[in-house]
Every structure is written in C-alpha cells, then in structure tokens.
Amino acid sequence: MIVLTGGAGFIGSCFLASLNAAGREDVLIVDSLGTGNKWKNLVDRTFIGIVGKEEFRDMMAVGDVEDVEAVVHMGACSSTTETDADYLYDNNYLYSIDVAEFAIERGARFIYASSAATYGSGSRGYADSSTDLRPLNMYGYSKHLFDRWIREQNLTDSCVGLKFFNVFGPNEYHKGSMSSMVFKAVSQIHASGSVSLFKSVDPSYTDGGQMRDFVYVKDVCKVMMTLLERPDVNGIMNLGTGVARTWNDLMTAVFTAMGREPNIVYTDMPEGLAKQYQNFTLADMSTMQRALPDVQFGSLESTVADYVQEHLLKDWPYL
C-alpha cells in the first residue's frame, strides 16, 4: 500500500493519476476535501479511501496502518501568505516529522514535498545542498525546518525531499489565490481580453520581467514516479526545469495557446507582498541531473499549450 498525504490536492491528485496509470490502486489518501471543489480532483481516480490528518495521526500513534510500501507526503498548507505561524509549525513541520518517523519505522520509501520558498530572496543561491538559508515567509521557514530536521537525523541517504519551484497544471483549480498565473490568466482573458501582472518594485527588473522557474505538474509527476521506483536515489533536491523565464513569457504563451494577441496590463504590487517578493528563481538542477540524467522537461510554450488546450479550454479540465 502507498500512503499519499495531500492526495486530493494539486500535485497529490496528479501523482495519484500517475499511480493509477501504472496500475497502482492500493493508495490511502490523507487529506481533507473541505467544502469547495477539491473533490473533483478525485472523480476519475481509484484509491482505497480517504482519512483526515488528525485521524491519520491517531492511526500512526496506535500502529493502525500495515503493509506500507511507500509514503508520499505532499500534504501541507502551501499558502505563502498564511500568517498563523503556530498552525504552520504544527501542520508543516511537526506533522511532517510524525509522517517521516512512521515511514522510517516501517522501512517504507519516503518522498516529501519541500519548496523553493526555503531559498527566500535567492540572495544565498539556489543550491539544494545549501543549509544557510533565510526564507521570506513562515511557509518557507516551516519547509526549511523540516529539511533541516531530515539532515540532522541523517536521513538524506534514505529518503527524498523535493524542493518544488513554480509548479502549474491541471487540478490546481481549488487553490484560489495560490493557483498559478496560467489558470488565472485564462479566466481573466475570457472575462476582459487582458491579463494583469504586478509592476516590478525592483529597478533591476522591468514590469513583467521578474523571472521564475516554471515547471509543469505532469513533468513533476514523471520525476516522482521514477523516484518511487528508484530507492537508490535519495537526498534533498530541487525540482524545477533549470530554466528561468519571465512572467511576460508565461503570459505570452497563454495568449498564444488561446490563439490571441498578448494584452498585458501592469498594476501596483500590494505592499505586504512586495516585502517578501521573489524577483528571480532558478532551480540548480545539478543534484537531480547527476542522480537521474535522463530526466527531461517540456518547454514553457509546449507545457502551457498542453495545460490550456487539453485542460483549461475543455468542459472537464481535470487530469
């Protein structure tokens, strides 16, 4: 059996689709469906059942989960604007320790989600071997704390931590303000014919010229499936594409995928966001390239086109 925390969420449900495609249906999801449309991520999926986080904590405490082959820990509060530090400390750090110890005690493969938010402004680089990091928000700090715990427990040779960069793709529709700009842009274009980007607050970058390492969730899941099947590959590693592109590039790709001419409007960045805004991110992919030299990623234009044309413009956009 595979335990998949966050299995109804964005990356988790897409990974579940990959598991199902590989014939794996013995998956226990740990998640909360809430009152929104997150449940739709699971409509086409097959799995054993769903339990909540606290119920799973109780199950772990009494040893009420047997025959676990792997634990894939995608469950977390992923909001970079969440301000309840106590909640993030418990949900993203302490709970992750519980899940890790549960997997380790059973000799199960353990793969977990870290984040590029651990790198903060990027002034200290984006090398996944770095530990001297200064996150800009509590979400990034909670992820950094768990990465640090993994290293302190000498677990980097027996598990995988993935520092996700800007992941976009199907099944992110429930994420609201934390959904990707590709998803938001299609809605904006349908409504007004234009898209809105924040003006730059750094003179080093033009409006819309701020850069990100955008990575498609389908490519992410291919990597995760490979890692699930390769217990010899371990460590904390970046998962982006190794290529930084501008927000303007991203929006142009969306307009092109929709068969329209770009129409981008720039608005002032909220003061609170400006204080923790990353102007540039780029995954140093050397660790993953050494471990998995055959891993390849689609171009920004091809992956945006797939997302827009095969999902966002369809009546049923789910993977």
Image (cartoon, rainbow, N blue to C red):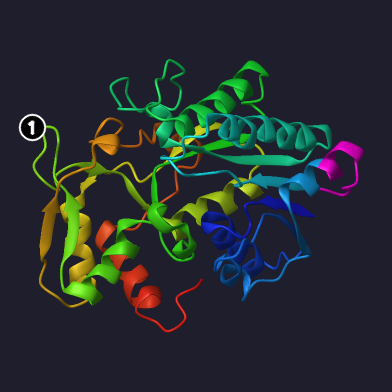
Quarter in which the N terminus is drawn: bottom right
Horizontal and vertical percent position of residue 228: 64, 48
Return the residue found at the far bottom: 315
Query: Which residue corresponds to the image point at 58% horizontal and 56% vertical from the top-left?
Result: 12
Res 280 seen here: no
Q: At numbered mark 1, what does the secondary structure look like: helix, strand or loop?
A: loop
The foreground one among 49 and 190 is: 190
Q: Is residue 89 left or right of residue 183?
A: right
When asked about the image quadrant of residue 190, the answer is bottom left
Instruction: Quadrant for residue 57, please give it.
Output: top right
Can the viewer see residue 119? Answer: yes
User: Which residue sits at x=43%, y=20%?
Assistant: 130
Crowd around label 1: few <14 · some 14–19 · many ≥20 (10 Å): few
Looking at the image, residue 79 sits to the left or right of residue 230; the answer is: left
In the rendered view, would you say 75 is above or below 36? above
Residue 198 picture location, percent across and down: 18, 48
Q: Which residues are the magenta region?
A: 58-68
Residue denoted by label 1: 203
**84 to 77, vertically: above or below:** above
- Number of marks present in the image shown: 1
Residue sitting at x 21%, y 64%: 253
Residue 66 on the magenta span: yes
Q: Position of residue 312 (x, y in %)?
A: 37, 74
Q: Is residue 300 magenta?
A: no
Percent from the top left, x then y, of residue 176? 42, 58
Q: Amino acid at mark 1?
A: Pro
**Residue lying at 52% horizontally and 55% vertically, measured from the top left:** 11
Pick the residue in front: 275 or 20.
275
Horizontally, residue 110 falls left or right of residue 287, namely right
